[in-house]
């Protein structure tokens, strides 16, 4: 499964090639100036370069909310069109799946929809797409409020307005439906498991008296799973001080070459990651109950077996769920 944030902006993952730096008074004047006026030409080039750099910074994927707000003010001062600044905010909020932020900027996005100029666009191709994202934001707000009717109404409106982004909106629908199922589910933490070293254990044993258990479902044949192993190691290190146990749950099948335990143990030794390495039984009880159709997948469980999160390891919603357990937990880069 692709990260939710990656699927979200299929056409907006970077500053589009057609996006232009804003035309300043200097650049307009330089276009009319004689070629010999090298001083004005140099000033115009410098202004254009500065504006282009600002656009790149506005649409940077790794900015924090505070950095984005500061950049927006700076961009406004140097003459970046208001439309492009709002687009940058929208793209950031969509990438981060930050519903409170999106709700905060929704009024200015709705105003922009009434005066959207495709010729001045930085990331959103047309007004219909912008309106689709407005409906999408309303759907996210409804999801947060557990308003199924409101979610359905707005997500269908988003699909109708922008069929090109339907994969994004359908994924949100699937996520909403899964979360509704998970909210009513209680996992049996006493199902017998083995560790990578063949020792008998259970999820209840691994939890001990801690606040929560974060399970990473993976397999050695899953490229994305293996690519995220360093991040898993970092999560285990960072969350242990907050009373959260992070464990790897291997889904490899036994083969003529090795058992699932042997495969998991090999990866454990290669990564030198000090966290529990578990092997799911061949019957896949947790995979079935948690409806894990794709990996990598992370599941956050309470000591009672309630599902607090079930999704991709890079979904920002994971950190929202973790902060509900301990408000001092911060996502990387924040």
Image (tube, rainbow, N blue to C red):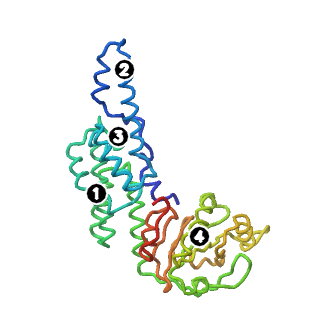
Q: Is residue 144 left or right of residue 297?
A: left
Instruction: State yes or no: discs 1 and 4 in contact (Cβ < 8 Å).
Output: no
Which is more N-terminal, label 1 or label 3?
Answer: 3
Residue of label 1: 135
Per the image, label 2 sits on a secondary structure element best described as helix
Which is more N-terminal, label 3 or label 2?
Answer: 2
Tell me if residue 157 comes above or below residue 280 in the rendering. Answer: above
Which is more N-terminal, label 1 or label 2?
Answer: 2
Residue 41 marker: 2
Q: CA distance from mark 2 to mark 3?
A: 25 Å
Task: From the image, state whether disc 3 or disc 1 is nearer to you.
Answer: 3
Instruction: State yes or no: discs 3 and 4 in contact (Cβ < 8 Å).
Output: no
* Label 4 Cα neighbours within 10 Å, binned few <14 / some 14-19 / many ≥20: some
Residue of label 3: 122
- Nearer the observer, 151 or 216: 216
* Residue 130, image x, y percentages: 29, 48
Tell me if residue 220 comes above or below residue 239 in the rendering. Answer: above
Which is more N-terminal, label 4 or label 3?
Answer: 3
Residue displayed at 48% across by 81% down: 302
Q: CA distance from mark 3 to mark 1?
A: 20 Å
Per the image, label 1 sits on a secondary structure element best described as helix
Which is more N-terminal, label 4 or label 1?
Answer: 1
Instruction: State yes or no: discs 2 and 3 in contact (Cβ < 8 Å).
Output: no
Q: Is residue 241 left or right of residue 279?
A: left
* Residue 311, image x, y percentages: 49, 67
Task: From the image, state whether disc 2 or disc 3 is nearer to you.
Answer: 2
* Label 1 Cα neighbours within 10 Å, binned few <14 / some 14-19 / many ≥20: many
Which is more N-terminal, label 4 or label 2?
Answer: 2
Q: Is residue 88 left or right of residue 114?
A: right
Tell me if residue 17 comes above or below residue 293 in the rendering. Answer: above
């Amino acid at each position: 499964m692709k990260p939710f944030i990656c699927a979200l902006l299929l056409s907006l993952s970077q500053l589009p090639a057609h996006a232009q730096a804003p035309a300043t008074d200097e650049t307009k004047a330089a276009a009319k100036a004689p070629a010999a006026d090298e001083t004005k030409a140099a000033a115009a080039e410098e202004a254009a370069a500065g504006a282009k750099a600002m656009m790149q910074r506005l649409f940077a994927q790794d900015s924090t909310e505070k950095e984005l707000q500061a950049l927006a003010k700076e961009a406004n001062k140097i003459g970046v069109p208001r439309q492009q600044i709002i687009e940058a905010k929208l793209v950031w909020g969509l990438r981060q799946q930050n519903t409170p932020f999106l709700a905060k900027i929704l009024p200015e996005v709705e105003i922009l929809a009434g005066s959207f100029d495709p010729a001045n666009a930085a990331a959103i191709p047309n007004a219909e797409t912008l309106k689709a994202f407005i409906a999408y934001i309303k759907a996210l707000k409804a999801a947060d409020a557990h308003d199924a009717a409101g979610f359905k109404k707005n997500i269908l409106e988003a699909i109708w307005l922008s069929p090109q982004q339907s994969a994004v909106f359908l994924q949100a629908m699937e996520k909403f439906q899964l979360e509704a199922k998970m909210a009513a589910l209680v996992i049996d933490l006493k199902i017998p498991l083995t560790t990578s070293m063949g020792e008998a254990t259970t999820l209840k044993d691994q939890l001990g008296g801690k606040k929560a258990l974060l399970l990473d479902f993976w397999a050695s044949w899953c490229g994305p799973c293996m690519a995220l192993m360093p991040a898993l190691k970092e999560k285990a290190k960072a969350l242990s001080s907050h009373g959260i146990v992070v464990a790897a749950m291997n889904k490899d099948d036994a083969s003529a070459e090795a058992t699932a335990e042997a495969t998991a143990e090999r990866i454990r030794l290669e990564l030198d990651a000090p966290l529990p390495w578990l092997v799911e039984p061949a019957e896949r009880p947790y995979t079935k109950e948690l409806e894990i159709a794709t990996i990598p997948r992370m599941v956050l469980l309470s000591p009672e077996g309630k599902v607090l999160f079930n999704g991709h390891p890079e979904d920002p919603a994971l950190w929202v769920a973790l902060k509900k357990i301990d408000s001092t937990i911060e996502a990387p880069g924040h």
